[in-house]
Amino acid sequence: MAKTVAAIEKDLGPIVLAVFNAGSYIATAGEDLTVRGFRQSFDVNYFGIINGLVPVIERMRVRARGHIVLVGSVTAYFGWPTTAAYGGTKAAINILAESLKYDFDKMNVRIQVTNPGFVDTPLTEKNLLPMPGLMPVNRASRRMARGIKSGGFEVTFPRRLSWGLKLLRILPRPFCRWVISTATRWKARPLNFDRKPPSE
Ligand SMILES: NC(=O)c1ccc[n+]([C@@H]2O[C@H](COP(=O)([O-])OP(=O)(O)OC[C@H]3O[C@@H](n4cnc5c(N)ncnc54)[C@H](OP(=O)(O)O)[C@@H]3O)[C@@H](O)[C@H]2O)c1
């Protein structure tokens, strides 16, 4: 990534905006955990950002100018069924952005985190959960671009879903889990004991 960043700047000039968007979703059901699933999720979603962020920020720090966007998810707000790995990476991304903001502000580098709701992409094809407010990718991209231009620390959409989830987050946890369990019909879902033990 350091070489890639150097090559981009050599060919195109200083990077003024870097959007760290790569991500993969591996469903992690409680009865079917694999170490590899967690490792892959963190390697791509979290360390993928770190690998690129470090060489980019070195250059932005010297120039005292830059703009970083990390792509999180509303699954960062609390635990959902199947998101032990994916949601964990997205929660870590939110903490990363929040923590770095203290110093990046002093360095004149803006950092934002986007927490989109559900967007109709190949990633959500693998999702086993109901997806309220599923957005077409064009609309989500426009919404994200608008949020990046606005400069606010967190960009989240669709508003009705993310504000509802934020409200849920501050209510007592057992109530929050009950709502999620009911909305996803997760309690009624049988455990998949027929599945072969996963190979590492
Ligand atoms: N879709 C949603 O509902 C939703 C909601 C919230 C947040 N997000 C986040 O939005 C971002 C984009 O997701 P998407 O929905 O657009 O999914 P997507 O269509 O599956 O795209 C995933 C992107 O990540 C890249 N990627 C995946 N694994 C990689 C790896 N090992 N190394 C390098 N690049 C890799 C892919 O590159 P290639 O095309 O080269 O494989 C692709 O550009 C992700 O961070 C995701 O977590 C998505």
Image: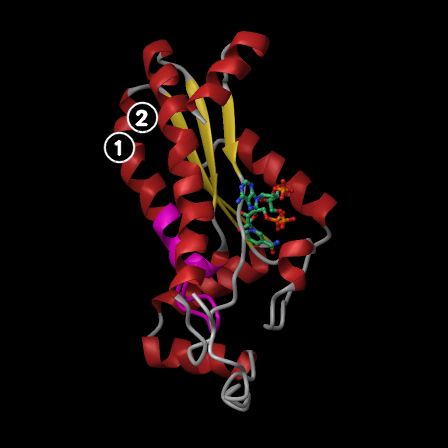
Task: Determine whether 15 is above or below 197 in the image.
Answer: above
Q: Which residues are magenta?
A: 75-93
| Viewer-nearest residue: 125 or 7 | 7
Which mark, by number, is residue 105? 2
Q: Indicate the amino acid at tag 2.
A: Asp
Q: Are marks 1 and 2 in contact (CB under 8 Å)?
A: yes
Residue at the (61%, 67%) spot, across then down: 127
The numbered mark at residue 179 is none
Is residue 133 shown to the viewer in this render?
no
Residue 106: where, in percent of width, then height? 27, 22
Left or right position of 173 against 199:
left
Seen from the viewer's position, the closer of residues 50 and 37 is 37
Categorize mark 1 by other alpha carbons within 10 Å: few (<14), some (14-19), many (20+): few
Q: Residues within 10 Å of mark 2 (few under 14, many from 20)?
A: few
CB of mark 2 near ligand 1 (< 8 Å): no
Residue matched to label 1: 102
Name the residue rendered at 61%, 35% in the picture. Answer: 146
In terms of image quadrants, where is residue 147?
top right
In x, y percent, where is residue 69?
Answer: 47, 34
Residue shown at 46%/47% (left/top)? 45
User: The C terminus appears in which quarter of the rendering?
Assistant: bottom left
Can you say whether 146 is above or below 44 in the image? above
Element type where label 1 sits in the image: helix
